[in-house]
């Protein structure tokens, strides 16, 4: 089971910021990093030489997503690539981990939703909402 940590280790902060900026350039809504999966693996440098593989939980708008990135330092800063294309097909191997967002990820969502609607229905299913 993946270790989800809400606080990004300081040693990973520059790479996480680069991955977030790269991801946000491709989105119609601004996302923020609300967690990292297995930060000790990223700190150990598993993956391509000179690059870190980051598995981040990104939340923006009304959704949270788990995305994986390869981040490598270069002369201009950082080169970022998505690892989504390299992900194995769930039918071929293990199914992807289904993660509920960390507790702080949607902390303000309910207040914003109540301000926009007369009522909000929350559906809980096996710990997910």
Image (cartoon, rainbow, N blue to C red):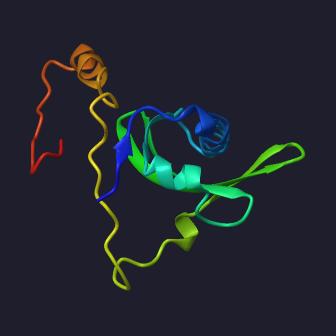
From what the image shows, is residue 51 above or below residue 73?
below
Which residue is the extreme one toward the bottom?
A: 92
Percent x, y of residue 86 = 56, 72
Q: Residue 10's image quarter?
A: top right
Percent x, y of residue 63 = 36, 40
From what the image shows, is residue 94 above or below residue 53?
below
Which residue is the extreme one toward the front?
A: 44
Residue at 21%, 18% in the rendered image: 114
Determine whether, in the image, residue 14 is placed left or right of residue 124: right
Which residue is the extreme one toward the right?
A: 75
Residue at 17%, 46% in the rendered image: 128
Q: Residue 77's image quarter?
A: top right
Determine whether, in the image, residue 39 is placed left or right of residue 129: right
Percent x, y of residue 96 = 34, 67
Number of residue marks: 0
From what the image shows, is residue 121 above or below residue 1?
above
Q: Residue 62's image quarter?
A: top left
Residue at 87%, 43% in the rendered image: 76
Query: Where's the C terminus, which quadrant?
Result: top left
Percent x, y of residue 45 = 61, 57
Query: Where's the N terminus, which quadrant?
Result: bottom left
Residue at 64%, 55% in the rendered image: 52
From what the image shows, is residue 57 above or below residue 9?
below
């Amino acid at each position: 089971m993946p270790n989800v940590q809400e606080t990004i280790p300081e040693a990973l902060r520059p790479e996480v910021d680069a991955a977030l900026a790269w991801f946000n350039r491709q989105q119609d809504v601004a996302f923020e990093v609300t967690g990292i999966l297995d930060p000790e693996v990223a700190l150990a440098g598993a993956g391509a030489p000179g690059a870190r593989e980051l598995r981040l939980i990104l939340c923006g708008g009304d959704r949270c997503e788990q995305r994986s990135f390869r981040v490598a330092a270069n002369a201009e800063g950082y080169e970022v690539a998505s690892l989504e294309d390299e992900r194995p097909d769930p039918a071929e191997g293990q199914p992807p981990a289904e993660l509920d967002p960390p507790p702080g990820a949607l902390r303000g969502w309910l207040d914003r939703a109540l301000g926009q609607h007369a009522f909000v229905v929350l559906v809980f299913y096996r710990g997910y909402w």
